[in-house]
Image (spheres, grey):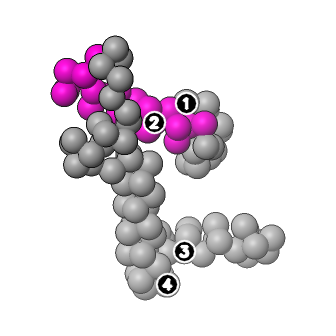
């Protein structure tokens, strides 16, 4: 995955690589070879798992919800407020 200093975000190419690796690992666990012509959707159906990008995004939103509900004097909430203001082109005080 491409390294971008100071960023925790992933670009779409990174998400694709992560999902690809996840399915590749599931294929190894299920002993599915490339010449078996099994689609990625079928692999996910057999394992009952979601794409790893979906799982990560869902957990990020859960964490975001917890931080938003914290008191204003908690450092995690303060950092979140600064980040959201800076994204809205406001300068933090």
Mark toward the start of the polypeptide (3 vs 4): 4
Out of 93 and 50, give the one closest to the viewer.
50
- Chief secondary structure of the magenta span? helix
80, 33: nearer the viewer: 33
Q: Which numbered disc, 2 or 4, marks the residue that appears first in the sequence?
A: 2
Are discs 2 and 4 less than 8 Å apart at CB? Answer: no
Measuring from the top left, give residue 8's x and y in whole percent: 56, 48
> Mark 2 vs mark 3: which is more N-terminal?
2
Of callouts 1 and 2, the N-terminal one: 1
Residue 88 showing in the rendered view: yes
- In the rendered image of this protein, does residue 31 appear above or below residue 16? above
* SS class, disc 4: loop
* Among the 4 quarters of the image, the one containing residue 30: top left
- Label at residue 26: none
Q: Quadrant of residue 66?
A: bottom left
Is 49 in the magenta? no
Q: Quadrant of the C terminus?
A: bottom right
Q: Nearer the viewer, residue 80 or 92?
A: 80
The residues tagged by marks 1 and 4 sit, at their Cα atoms, a distance apart of: 35 Å
């Amino acid at each position: 995955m491409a390294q971008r200093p100071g960023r925790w975000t992933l670009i779409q190419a990174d998400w694709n690589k992560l999902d690809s690796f996840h399915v590749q690992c599931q294929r190894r666990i299920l002993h599915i070879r490339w010449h078996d012509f099994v689609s990625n959707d079928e692999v996910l159906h057999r394992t009952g798992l979601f794409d790893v990008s979906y799982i990560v995004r869902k957990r990020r939103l859960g964490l975001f919800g917890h931080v938003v509900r914290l008191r204003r004097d908690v450092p995690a909430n303060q950092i979140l407020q600064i980040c959201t203001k800076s994204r809205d082109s406001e300068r933090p005080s």
